[in-house]
Image (cartoon, rainbow, N blue to C red):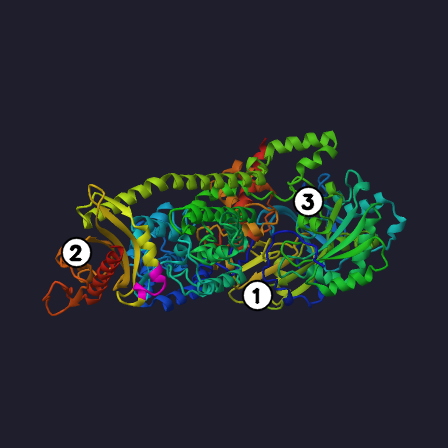
Amino acid sequence: MNFNLSSSPHVRNAKSTRSIMWDVNLALLPATAFGVYRFGIHALLILLISIATAVLCEFCYQKITHKEVLISDGSAVLTGLLLGLNMPPSVPLWIPVLGSAFAIIFVKQFFGGLGKNFMNPALGGRCFLLISFTSIMSTFTVDGVAGSTPLAKLAAGETTDLLDMFLGYTGGVIGEVSVLAILCGAVYLLVKKIISWYIPVCYLVTFALFMFLFGGFNPQFVLAHLLGGGLMLGAWFMATDYVTSPVSKKGKVIFGILLGILTGVFRLYGATAEGVSYAIIFSNLLVPLIERISMPKAFGLEKVKKEKPVKAAEEVKEEKAEKANDAPKAPVSLKTYHAALNLTVIALVLGGLLGTVYQLTKGPIEYAKQQEELAAYKEVSPDAKTFDEATDLVAAINDEYANGGISAGAFGNVKLDSAYIAKGSSKETIGYVVNVTTSDGFGGDISLSIGVDANGSITGIAFLTINETAGLGMNAKNESFYSQYIGKNVDLFTVTKSGSSSDSEIDALSGATITSKAVTNAVNAALYIADKAE
Amino acid sequence: MSLATFRGGVHPYDGKELTKDKAITRLMPKGELVFPVSQHIGAPATPVVKKGDAVLMGQIIAEAGGFVSSNIISSVSGTVKAVEPRLTPSGAKVNSIIIENDGQYTPVEGLGTKRDYKNMTKEEIIDAVKAAGIVGLGGAGFPTHVKLMPKDPSKIDYIIVNGAECEPYLTSDYRVMMETPERLVEGLKIMLSLFDNAKGVIAIENNKPEAIEKLTELVKDEEKIEVCPLKTKYPQGGERNMVYAVTGRRLNSRLLPADLGCIVDNVDTVVAIQMAVSETTPLMRRIVTVTGSAVNEPSNFEVKIGSSFAEVIEAAGGLKEGTKKVIAGGPMMGMALSSVDVPMVKTSSAVTAFLVDDVEVCKESPCIRCGRCVDACPSHLMPLMLMDAAEACDDEKFVALNGMECYECGSCAFVCPAHRPLTQGFKQMRQLVAAKRRKK
């Protein structure tokens, strides 16, 4: 008889790389399902395309490089799924293609494939997209309406509904909105012992503490930050990625703490509302270092030093001779806690630096922004030399607004952002610049800057923000459309589809009546406001 | 109360229900028996018989070849057919004494004489153990009389009887505890009589509640003996883990249990001591579990040392069609056999045979750094890093990462989801490092 020969052990655990990867995919199912339910078929398409691209790229790379094709291990599917879940629900479909290809080829395969990548491929892909296509990747639409994410609201000082955030009725990327769905998956992973609690719990606790201490001792604020954005998805599904996190318990604790601090710093002081992705990939890079300092001490070698004095001189001598042979070298004897402290200090210093840079650049950035706005005002009020902020006017209108004035529906959903008095060369008032935002557009908010002269004639119109349908509503930006208002002195413009027959009638943009009406209403509001000022 | 245990370890399927309730039956060998001169740690024994000599049962046929060595005893009476190298379970050819069994079992003079250890001096007891050729029957085969002669016997305060039997599928120790607990306790008392400051602890994993109960009952009037239940976890029976679980003391690769005041012996070894001292019967037999999915009638046997594996397997109903693997020992630390025509030696605790070979089925894939090996390692090493060193054949790095602290329990390789042959890599590195050190 011929028996198999191999070295012991002769039995193997049932858990394999493949079963683990598919379990993680399964654990993401609740979040995926909720995302699709909430954001619709386009979200599903994004996910499918993201996964398909990831698998295809892995397959092609392994074929081309004559490596074993390992797509059935589920790791490419996982990367694709995670990346898809990290996309806003309205991105064009070439975005997931690009992101997945980058994640698989550049972040994963170029570094040696499964197990060798130094940063989480899905997050690598996401950050690549975030940096390259910032506006696409940070526009969040729900039911066709662009809205801000809870974190953006928090950053703007607004409050958020915690229950909605927990359940997922907020804006955000496909997979992050429902904390409940994410936690369901996390519990599955914990129960199946695929992840341990060390990283996520240390991460969340550190983050909460950081936000409490540096965010104004406000539990409500901390809670909103815990529930908001990619924190839960990141903490349970991406920070716990085996390949890019430390292997020892101690290392996992250090890693979690580092993540908590970095995310806190990024969210509180960073330029963007979100910080989880950057915190994780930055910490990924520090894993080899964490690994060094968190190496467990070999059993039985922990107390070698302590025992020395009690030993007879001869034994010590013997031991020394032996030690010369197989001395447990530096990595093991490093003082872990000391190193952990160092790491914390480094993280804090880095965070401080980041904050400082932000503070330093804040001034210049705002100045540049002001210059930009000034240029827009000059455009709509070409004769003016200087602009003074019309604070009284804004206050008066806002008062009225609060009492149901211009919001009563006369001009639709129009809001006054700011107003300026345009002054001529000898400081005389020659007109007004009114900045308004209407939310009646087809593609969300439209912000305009409108110039009105002292007589009530329109001197110019500039669009500050507009996200209308290209080729239709977007044509409002064409001079042929907005020049219809300029130079006219009427009390109220109306929109017509049957050809303008008077100064007050504006020809609607073809196929974009909603946009035309929204813009016209905004102009009417500006006229009304300017009239109030006189 | 939380049970005594250690940090790390794994929970493989234990398969013990196959043979747990199978009483030990005695097997009488036919034909020739093979006695390799090296069945223990230390120097090989020196044959004292030659071809054509007649030998009696219980006769010393090879004498200890040094301080750390052991006598070899003939387990049958008959004629020496040859002294020549034969294949052993370890896969090596070892010089062996081959005896043709005459089937008479004629005992050597004095065999089986009852003695009372209380009337014997410590030296007499140790000499009896030494003459009986007793070695650690748990698997390592360290000569027992050497363990009983530490530098300073007064510093020994624990004698631990290792009844963990953490190796999956094995039930031989369990059967010994169930069937001859009196011998076990008397053996322990003999050992305790050698060390004035020691207390005896019988440590048993809590998956053997009947054994715990039985022995607890038996030692309830013994002042110096207690039963210590242990958490069921592989490798609870590893010497370092056992000493830690019972005493909290930490051994390493450079310390013997005696350095920390402990003597650890396997259940069957303690019974062998009892037989040698109280009944003047040297080590001629051992208890063997024959089990696994490929064995027709899994059983526990009392086997004459020197019998062939083939004979023992035959006694258990033979192997099933399509047997993939036969292992001398258990599935975690045993050795795969290429042939069953090898002799049962002192350390042959079991024969396990499987229809499915996990090692063959599970394909190796890249490490995904899941850290399971780190959690499983009872020596608190970083197997994934050691494997990098092993793959690069970098013995300096291997030593720096404390690779020599590995005792090849197999937990890391068992638990690895990428099915990397971690333990195999470490075995090779450890041999390489040991060989280099010997050269110096």
Give the chain of mark 3: B
- Does B392 appear above or below B420? above
> Dot 1, how many residues are within 10 Å of its Cα: few (below 14), some (14-19), or many (20+)?
some
Question: Residue B153, percent across and down?
Answer: 80, 41
Q: Residue at x 31, y 41 (%)?
A: A367
Query: How far apart are labels 1 and 2 at the CA level?
Result: 96 Å
What residue is shown with label 2? A457
- What is the quadrant of residue B29 in the picture? bottom right
Q: Residue at x 19, y 67 (%)?
A: A513
Q: Is residue A158 left or right of residue A379?
A: right
Q: Residue at x 15, y 65 (%)?
A: A508
- Does B59 appear above or below A338? below
- Does B399 appear above or below A530? above
Instruction: Tell me if residue A401 is in the magenta stretch.
Output: yes
Mark toward the viewer: 3 or 2: 2
* Element assignment for label 3: loop
What residue is shown with label 3? B250
Name the N-terminal-most of marks 1 and 3: 3
Give the chain of mark 1: B
- Does A465 appear above or below B384? below
Question: Residue B59, percent across and down?
Answer: 76, 50
Q: Which amino acid type is marked by label 3?
A: Arg
Q: Which image quarter holds the C terminus of chain B? A: top right
Give the magenta range: A399-407
Mark toward the viewer: 1 or 3: 3
Query: How far apart are labels 1 and 3 at the CA level?
Result: 37 Å
Give the chain of mark 2: A
